[in-house]
Image (cartoon, rainbow, N blue to C red):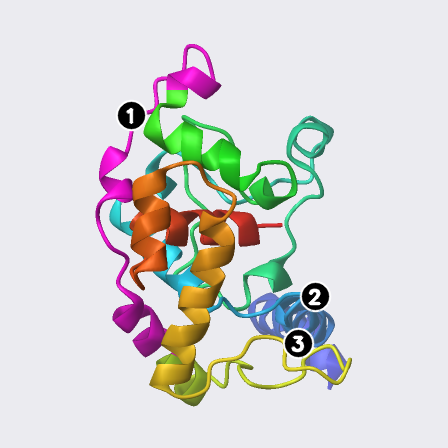
Amino acid sequence: MFHWFEQRPFFFSVLLFIFIAFAGIVEVIPDFAKQSRPTVGTKPYSVLELAGRHVYIKDSCNACHSQLIRPFKSETDRYGMYSLSGEYAYDRPFLWGSKRTGPDLMRVGNYRTTDWHENHMMDPASVVPGSIMPAYPHHFTNMADLDTAYGEAYTVKNVFNTPYDVDIDGDGKVDVELGDYDTAIAKAKEEAKAIAADMKNQAVKDAVANGQVPEIVALIAYLNSLK
């Protein structure tokens, strides 16, 4: 049989290609599936964090900021550990970005504070001299859309089996509580109070105390979650 293939180069090439392709599939797919699973410690976004993510997308922050640290020393020295595919398991859509007018934000929650973000969003140049980033004062007056954020969380929980209301890390506690609508919105407002407590803007504090959630609070919750 092999003698027959050796006399016919075209069929021999096809056979060789099939063997190599099959071997490649056997080697690559299991590892690819493993790497695409959620990295240990990765949790789905809370409703408040999702609302902030929606603000991030709405104002096209990903047009100037990437969320993808490449495995190069120059990148890891500046931004921290390089990105792992499993860290994006609950991102829909991905916000990798394709341009860095500003710095990468993949791990911004590790080195920036709520107070820093508050000042930076109101007046970037006051925090980063020479910054060309525009100010976003409307984030302090516009209210975050918690209803849409809850709708997304509810959808991904039931359609994509995103692990809300379960113990992911086995410590006996629910990692990210969703529950019903009223529970989720109440939880988001409690998280907002914790964020606002570290802010100086009195109008934001008053809004949160009255049960509202300004976009800046939700956006900071999202940025703080990026670690």
Q: Which residue is mark 1?
A: 134
Residue 131: say if magenta: yes
Q: Is residue 136 above or below residue 142?
A: above
Residue 75 visible in the picture: yes
Given residues 40 and 164, the one toward you in this image is 164
Q: Which residue is mark 3?
A: 22
Q: Nearer the viewer, mark 3 or mark 2?
A: 2
Looking at the image, is mark 3 or mark 2 earlier in the sequence?
3
Looking at the image, is mark 2 or mark 1 earlier in the sequence?
2
Residue 27: say if magenta: no
Instruction: Give the Cα distance between marks 3 and 2.
Output: 34 Å
Given residues 99 and 207, the one toward you in this image is 207
Magenta stretch: give its range. 125-153
SS state under label 1 = loop
Q: Find residue 194 and report its horizontal and vertical position in percent.
A: 51, 56
Q: Which residue is mark 2?
A: 41
Q: Find residue 193 and report its horizontal and vertical position in percent.
A: 45, 57
